[in-house]
Image (spheres, rainbow, N blue to C red):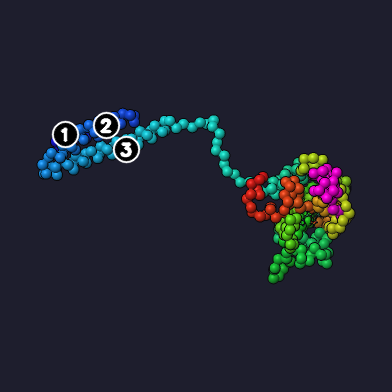
Amino acid sequence: MLQKISQLEQSALEAIRAATTQDELEQVRVIYLGKKSDFTAIMKSLGSLDADQKREIGPIANAARKKVQEKIQSKQQELEDAFDAQTQWIDVTAPGKRDNLGHLNPLSIVQRDIEDIFTSMGFEISDGPEIETEYYNFDAVNVPDNHPARDMQDTFWIDAPRGEKHVLRTHTSSVQVRYMQQHTPPYRIIIPGRVFRQEATDASHEHTFHQLEALVVGENVSVANFLDIAQSFFSAFFGREIKVRLRPSYFPFVEPGFEFDISCTICSGDGCSACQRTGWIEIGGAGMVHQNVLEAGGYEKGKYTGFAWGFGLERLAMMKYKIDDIRHFHSGDIRVSEQF
Ligand code: FA5
């Protein structure tokens, strides 16, 4: 009996090894472990043996049967793996899975668009520090000591025990003199950047917002150049013809100074609810750079002229994308950027 068990085990293992498909392996299983198999017959015959024989042969027969079972299982796995490797092919023409990409904040989109337009018009992009000295933010751009803009209401002053006073820059005009000190005209630059004001927030005011400054300095730069560049820029930005209108105004760093409006991007100047029926929308401040500023930049008085302008990026983005509240930009609410 023991010899028979051993022979049966050997031939079963041999047959398992020889099986090359899952079907063949299944046949081997039926032959060696099925109901009518020799193993089953042996297991059944154990009942008729006497106690001593049972004790001797039983465990051996069981172990042999178990071993054959295990070998079949592992061979089964091996054949399945081989089958998968053969049948799982890669369709290189199938479209890839879409990555779940993030979205740009509409403000970033607007800033990139603006930078593209200006660089195509020959402008360079510049920047300066957000924590700025009182000098560059105010004195250098001709803002007198007693000007209300320096008032605690508008400006975040930095607590510093000694040394020069610092502020969170209140406008991008703070970069003008920094740039002048490093460069000789002619040049045309834009300065996009974050600015800060100690203001109560509402749908159109933030304490932290972005401005875009443009500065063009050369030997014969005029208001006409400003108008031309501004009209080209806004027309490119809104994708339709835009007119620019100047209204006299006062900023310490320009003379003469203007506020400028653009023709309404919705009604093109006919008058609608978006422009309060005026046909015009206020955009920002501009003017011919004050000679005191050019002098602070290190230029000989009277040698150059230039213009500068500054406007709020959020307000422009709000117009372009019809966003009704400036606070959406920095809310961190992902539903805002998901729309862009
Ligand atoms: C200035 O900051 C000047 N530096 C602009 C300038 C530059 C004038 C060069 C002349 C020459 P003003 O304080 O008006 O000006 O701000 C300019 C623009 O910033 C405003 O027209 C508006 O679009 C935006 N702005 C001002 N305050 C806020 C605010 N709290 N929230 C959002 N946008 C604002």
The residue lying toward the viewer, choosing from 243 and 159, is: 243
Tell me where residue 44 sits by quadrant.
Answer: top left
Q: Which residues are magenta?
A: 257-280
Whether residue 132 is visible: no
202 vs 112: above or below = below
Q: Which residue lies under the disc numbered 2? A: 30
Dot 3 or dot 1: first in sequence order is 1
The residue lying toward the viewer, choosing from 89 and 265, is: 265
- Does the magenta run of residues contain 264? yes
| Rendered location of residue 301, percent (x, y) | 87, 56
Measured in 3D between alpha carbons, the distance from the residue under mark 3 to the one under mark 2, in whole angstroms, is 16 Å
- Does the magenta run of residues contain 219? no
Q: Which residue lies under the disc numbered 3? A: 74
Q: Which residue lies under the disc numbered 1? A: 4
SS for dot 2: helix
76 vs 168: above or below = above
Residue type pointed to by label 2: Val
Image quadrant for the N terminus? top left
Q: Nearer the viewer, mark 2 or mark 1?
A: 2
Decide if residue 73 is on the left or right side of residue 312.
left
